[in-house]
Amino acid sequence: MDYSAQFDALQRTVTEAKMAAEAATTESRDQLRQRIDLAQVDVDRGAQDAEQGADATDAGARSTWAQMKADAAAKRDDIKAKIDARNAQFDADIAAGDAVLAEQAAYDALDYAGWAVDNARLAVLDAIDARSYADERAKATSG
């Protein structure tokens, strides 16, 4: 497997997310809603790709990662519902409280992303070790 290419793609995704967040701070709410809709498409596409990838793995690994993906999908739906509810609010104090909660959720999501990257690193190292051991065993039994 080409883990390096996957890490490069992940790095590009993080760079694009950072650039989008920086640009969004100066955009109108209409522009921001368009950016959110585009991000939603990307998230949905990523979920479909992950589902297809999970179908290719064994049942044990699939159950762990599938549950994490389902949890992420539920969180995504929760965020979308909060955005819709926010658009119906008129009270400034409620909107300010909602902003604090949304900011904390964003920090939590970034923390989770860091945790996911750490876990990806561990999984990649484990996969490399498992392949190395399998190759070593194959050589020992054939020679």
Image (cartoon, helix red, strand yellow):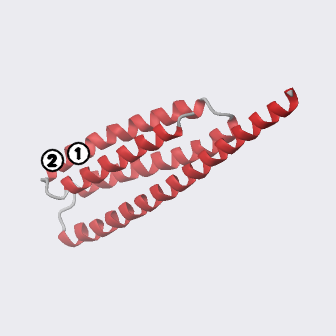
Indicate whether 90 appears above or below 32: below
- Horizontal relation, residue 126 to residue 15: left or right: right
Label 2 element class:
helix
Q: Residue at x 71, y 39 (%)?
A: 132
Rendered location of residue 88, percent (x, y): 22, 55
Which residue ends up furthest to the top in the rendered image?
142
Label 1 element class:
helix
- Horizontal relation, residue 135 to residue 82: left or right: right
Which residue ends up furthest to the front in the rendered image?
143
Residue type for callout 2: Gln
Instruction: Classify residue 143 by image quadrant.
Output: top right
Per the image, the residue denoted by label 1 is 35
Q: Residue at x 36, y 50 (%)?
A: 14
Q: Residue at x 54, y 32 (%)?
A: 53
Instruction: Classify residue 45 by image quadrant.
Output: top left
Count of numbered circles in the view: 2
Which of 58/136 is in front? 136
Q: Residue at x 39, y 37 (%)?
A: 44
Circle 2 crowding by C-alpha within 10 Å: few under 14, some 14–19, many from 20: few
Per the image, the residue denoted by label 2 is 31
Which residue ends up furthest to the bottom in the rendered image?
93
Residue type for callout 1: Arg
Q: CA distance from mark 2 to mark 1?
A: 6 Å
